[in-house]
């Protein structure tokens, strides 16, 4: 939902958004969203655990060296966005911020699409991330069971791979992790009714 | 869009596609048969607006002309797809109008999508178009009202522009045309 204030919205307007909503501010527009639905939340949580265990916590013999953070409030100049997940190489962000504002550009973000946020994610946030030099983006649609892997090349997003259904997701920048997509959304009803052609 | 269960047991073939009822759009991608209902008005209005804008500028003969087709059956190897719109430079395919079956890779395609058909358009068809070296692709989402423009670069789709709302857009490979996005949304 877009709340167009009189004139450009500011961070002060964002701070006045009701606490049960996720609030984002891009190009002077304030956007507020309900908390994520179950399949959305589930996907982000599972990927956060699969990636975060080896790459943040160094578990299972993983390399560590990253911060993997759920729904951080990321400040990119005057814009404020909340990716579902974000990752930073610790060499680029040695310390987690003391307050809620992350002002270092993430190295990786993961956005989980909802039917109501596709345009905001694809047409507003992705160009913003590109402008600020985020290197990798994963775009997941848990209702359609798809994940698109994007890499920034010369300032533009390049689609390097797409995963769907029961694929095992192995993707940059976390190639050491095998994410079993079936185990994430396998308990949910399948995305579309099955229909065979008349024969 | 529905995905045939039999696809999991055996690869679907063109014979299977021919058995799909006429009121459905049938596509065969990598041995899987996809059937989709005919487009809804919102979808048809968007496709029609793009088609009209391009035909006004490019629908002529000669070296700079393009063939711009609505929902053509395009055969690419063993795959059969029906993009909402596809275009070929006339100099590449001067006799396209004479063909029974199109087996020439389009120079440009446009898919009108929705959040519910993203799996077919973005996950199945876009990689297929990349494999066959379609140069440009547009994805139009008339529910959310935005247009994404992709160019194939070293075998991968690169986003070269994303436009939303009622912007006026000049997008490759049809830069000369001013596309009024409001018309795509029926305004």
Image (cartoon, coloured by chain):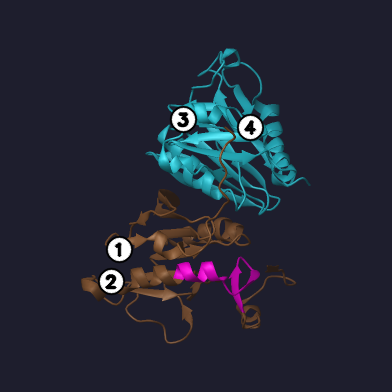
Chain colours: A brown, B cyan
Position in image of residue B11 (x %, y %): 42, 35
State the residue in front, B53 or A41.
A41
Residues indicated by labels 3 and 2 sit on the same polypeptide chain: no
Q: Check the image and report above or below for B186 versus A33.
A: above
Q: Which residue is mark 2?
A: A54
Give the mark, 3 or 4, whose residue is nearer the N terminus. Answer: 3
Read off the chain for label 2.
Answer: A
Residue found at the very far front of the displayed protein: A199
Write the residue at 30% across / 63% down: A177
State the residue in front, B61 or A137.
A137
Read off the chain for label 4.
Answer: B
Give the mark, 2 or 1, whose residue is nearer the N terminus. Answer: 2
Is B164 positioned to the left or the right of B63 in the image?
right
Instruction: For marks 3 and 2, give the CA distance.
Output: 43 Å
Q: Check the image and report above or below for A32 versus B32.
A: below
How busy is the neighbourhood of tag 4: few (under 14 within 10 Å), some, or many (20 plus)?
few
Q: Quadrant of residue A23?
A: bottom right
Judged from the image, the secondary structure of the residue bearing numbered disc 3 is loop
Q: Which residue is mark 3?
A: B13
Segment colored magenta: A21-44
Q: Check the image and report above or below for A22 versus B142.
A: below
Mark 2 or 4: the one toward you: 4
Q: Quadrant of residue A36?
A: bottom right
Instruction: For marks 3 and 4, give the CA distance.
Output: 15 Å
Residues indicated by labels 4 and 1 sit on the same polypeptide chain: no
Position in image of residue B74 (x %, y %): 53, 27
Judged from the image, the secondary structure of the residue bearing numbered disc 4 is loop
Question: Mark on residue A177?
Answer: 1
Instruction: For marks 4 and 1, give the CA distance.
Output: 44 Å
Read off the chain for label 3.
Answer: B
Question: Mark on residue B21?
Answer: 4
């Amino acid at each position: 939902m877009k709340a167009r204030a009189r004139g450009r919205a500011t961070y002060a307007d964002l701070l006045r958004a009701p606490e049960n909503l996720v609030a984002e501010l891009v190009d002077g527009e304030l956007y507020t969203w309900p908390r994520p639905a179950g399949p959305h939340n589930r996907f982000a949580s599972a990927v956060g655990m699969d990636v975060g265990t080896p790459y943040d916590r160094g578990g299972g013999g993983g390399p560590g060296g990253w911060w993997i953070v759920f729904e951080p409030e990321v400040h990119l100049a005057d814009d404020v966005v909340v990716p579902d997940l974000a990752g930073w190489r610790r060499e680029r962000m040695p310390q987690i911020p003391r307050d809620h504002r992350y002002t270092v550009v993430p190295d990786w973000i993961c956005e989980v699409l909802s039917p109501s946020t596709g345009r905001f994610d694809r047409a507003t946030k992705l160009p913003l991330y590109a402008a600020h030099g985020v290197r990798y983006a994963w775009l997941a649609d848990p209702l359609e069971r798809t994940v698109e892997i994007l890499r920034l090349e010369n300032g533009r997003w390049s689609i390097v791979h797409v995963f769907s259904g029961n694929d095992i997701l192995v993707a940059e920048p976390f190639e050491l992790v095998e994410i079993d997509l079936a185990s994430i959304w396998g308990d949910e009803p399948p995305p579309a009714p099955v229909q065979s052609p008349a024969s | 869009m529905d995905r045939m269960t039999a696809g999991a047991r055996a690869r679907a073939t063109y014979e299977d596609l021919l058995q799909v009822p006429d009121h459905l759009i049938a596509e065969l991608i990598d041995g899987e048969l996809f059937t989709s209902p005919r487009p809804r008005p919102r979808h048809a209005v968007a496709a029609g607006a793009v088609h009209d804008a391009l035909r006004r500028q490019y629908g002529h003969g000669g070296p700079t002309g393009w063939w711009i087709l609505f929902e053509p059956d395009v055969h690419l190897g063993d795959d059969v797809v029906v993009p909402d719109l596809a275009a070929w430079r006339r100099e590449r395919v001067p006799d396209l109008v004479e063909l029974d079956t199109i087996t020439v890779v389009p120079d440009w395609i446009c898919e009108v999508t929705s959040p519910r058909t993203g799996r077919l358009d973005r996950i199945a068809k876009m990689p297929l178009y990349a494999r066959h070296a379609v140069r440009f692709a547009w994805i139009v989402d008339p529910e959310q009202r935005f247009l994404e423009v992709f160019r194939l670069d070293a075998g991968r789709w690169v986003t070269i522009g994303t436009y939303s709302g009622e912007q006026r857009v000049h997008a490759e490979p049809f830069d000369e045309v001013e596309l009024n996005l409001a018309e795509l949304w029926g305004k």
